Amino acid sequence: MNPLPSDWTLNIIIWAVVWSALAVLQVIAARHDDVASFGTIVRFLRRWWVTRWVMLAFWVWLGWHIFVRTHY
């Protein structure tokens, strides 16, 4: 019962979509003053202690899933 794809194709596609979306957001934000960049959004979310803890928890979760290999 391994729910992960054996060749990780779906994982690569998902990461490519996420990074492409962030790159597109940055390009659009650079060209238009009324669109917030990713850094501006993160800075806005860091105003409140709850969102800081949520972002920290997400960062730890992401690092755990990227750098810790639980299957071979």
Image: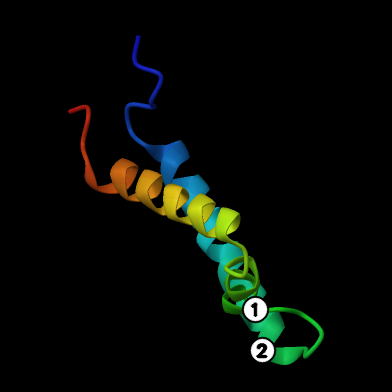
The residue sitting at the left extreme is 72
Kind of residue at disc 2: Ala
Q: How far apart are marks 1 and 2 (CA)?
A: 8 Å
Quadrant of the image containing the N terminus: top left
Residue depicted at 49% across the width and 53% down the height: 53
Is residue 33 depicted above or below 38 in this figure? below
The residue that label 1 is drawn on is: 37
Q: Nearer the viewer, residue 7 or 63?
A: 63
Q: In this view, does 10 lie to the left or right of 42?
A: left
Q: What element does badge 2 sit on?
A: helix
Residue depicted at 71% across the width and 78% down the height: 36
The residue sitting at the top extreme is 1
**What colouring method underlies this structural image?**
rainbow
Rendered location of residue 29, percent (x, y): 69, 83
Is residue 9 depicted above or below 50 in this figure? above
Rendered location of residue 15, percent (x, y): 47, 52
Q: Nearer the viewer, residue 44 or 65?
A: 44
Rendered location of residue 2, percent (x, y): 34, 16
Q: What element does badge 1 sit on?
A: loop
- CB under 8 Å between discs 1 and 2: yes
Q: Earlier in the sequence, mark 1 or mark 2?
A: 2
Kind of residue at disc 1: Ser
The residue sitting at the front extreme is 49
Rendered location of residue 8, percent (x, y): 36, 36
Q: Quadrant of residue 65?
A: top left
Q: In which quarter of the image is residue 28?
A: bottom right
The residue that label 2 is drawn on is: 30
